[in-house]
Image: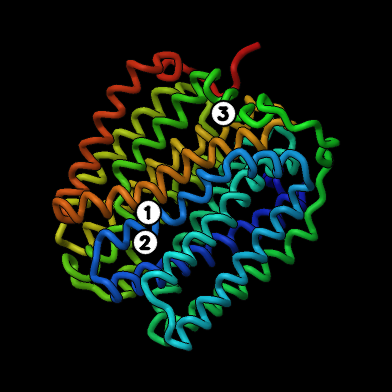
Amino acid sequence: MKNPLFAYPSFLFFLVLRVLTTMANQMMMVVVAWQMYDLTNSAYDLGMVGLAQFLPSLALVLVTGQVADRFDRRYVLAWCLAGQFLIAVALVAGTLEGWLNRETILLASVALGATKAFQMPTQQALTPQLVPLAILPRALAAASSGNQAAIIVGPAVGGFIYVAGAQVVYIACGLLFLAATACVFFIRVAQLPRAPQPVTLQSLFAGISFIWNRKEVLGAISLDLFAVLLGGATALLPIYAKDILHVGPWGLGMLRSAPAVGALIMSLYLAQHPIQRHVGRVMFGSVALYGVATLVFALSTSFVLSLAALAFSGMFDMVSVVIRQSLVQLDTPDEMRGRVSAANSIFIGASNQLGEFESGMTAGWFGAVPSVLIGGVGTLLVVAAWIRLFPGLARRHTLVTPA
């Protein structure tokens, strides 16, 4: 049977855009992390890269949501991608001319974080304009499939071509950003943004207020936040690759790709078999299994077992990602999607970039292995606590609330 998403070419261009952008960002992060650790040999500095990317999204949260709701989301997205192309050009120049150091890497990370601060809510708010809401969960799962495929390919390609020089990887990233920017101009939307309304304190904080008042949405977002914040080990992968598993940049690329392998498998399954029943129980169970996989990775000294543990962590995490995204998009009016997505992006950024900072700090204090162990145990404790704090989410049966 033909996939209904094929009837919406704008969504297909959007899907290609996401794949290209994600691949470029993943390649860039492999090189940036390896260069930083090569320069400083410091877990703290690896954590600082994550913090540098997160802080702009926190500082700009009230602005990014307004921009996504007031301007044509396609062109906001194009400007964000153009900005990332310029960052890639700067990294090429810094590598070739020899002035790329700890400080300039952190500055580039801040700039990258600023462009992503506008890109993420705009991208999330644009998706429901491209397909009917009835097939939105399927579209989100398909987008996640493409995203995870890029996360698999990107780090592996970045790690392998790093042998030709970091500048080669950055050049490839720049070309991918350019191609993604071109895709924007082939996207058509059925409903263009509404006329701007006066900016008020109420409108500025509307996204945060919306999430706070929807307790099941708040529970899903915060569960994912704390699980990935505590259980994520991405920032420490250079340490595992170099000092524990004794593999080079190619091994780091494979480790970074491994969670996406599991996530891709799960997202492909969910694209064909959307979660329709017991969504609360499924979400809590998958996050608990994510914590168990993190514990296995923490204790592993086998490269193969480490890859498998990371793959399973990505598989279980994808379930909560699809449920969270579906709840947010299905429950949010279109005129508020930019602001709600901006607030949601803070949670996502906190779980990823701030999680990298947390991992770097705890690894600096206790060591890499204890840091990941603490995160895995913390994830299991969060699941137990959230079942009590958000009983409505635990009992939720379907993604769509009955009228």
Q: Is residue 330 or residue 302 the one in the foreground?
A: 330
Q: Residue 360 carries which label?
A: none
Q: Are marks 2 and 1 in contact (CB under 8 Å)?
A: yes
Q: Mark 2 points at which residue?
A: 256
**Residue 246 placement (x, y as % from top left):** 19, 72
- Identify the image's colour scheme: rainbow, by chain, secondary structure or one colour: rainbow
Q: Residue at x 42, y 78 (%)?
A: 100
Q: Which residue is drawn at 81% across and 40% down?
A: 193
Q: What residue type is labelled 3?
A: Ile
Q: In this view, does 244 lie to the left or right of 218?
A: left
Task: Please determine whether, in this image, residue 202 is positioned above or below residue 186.
Answer: above
Q: Name the residue under label 3.
A: 208
Q: In this view, does 262 lie to the left or right of 117?
A: left
Q: Which amino acid does label 1 sit on?
A: Pro
**Residue 381 placement (x, y as % from top left):** 24, 29
Q: Which amino acid does label 2 sit on?
A: Arg
Visible residue check, residue 343: yes
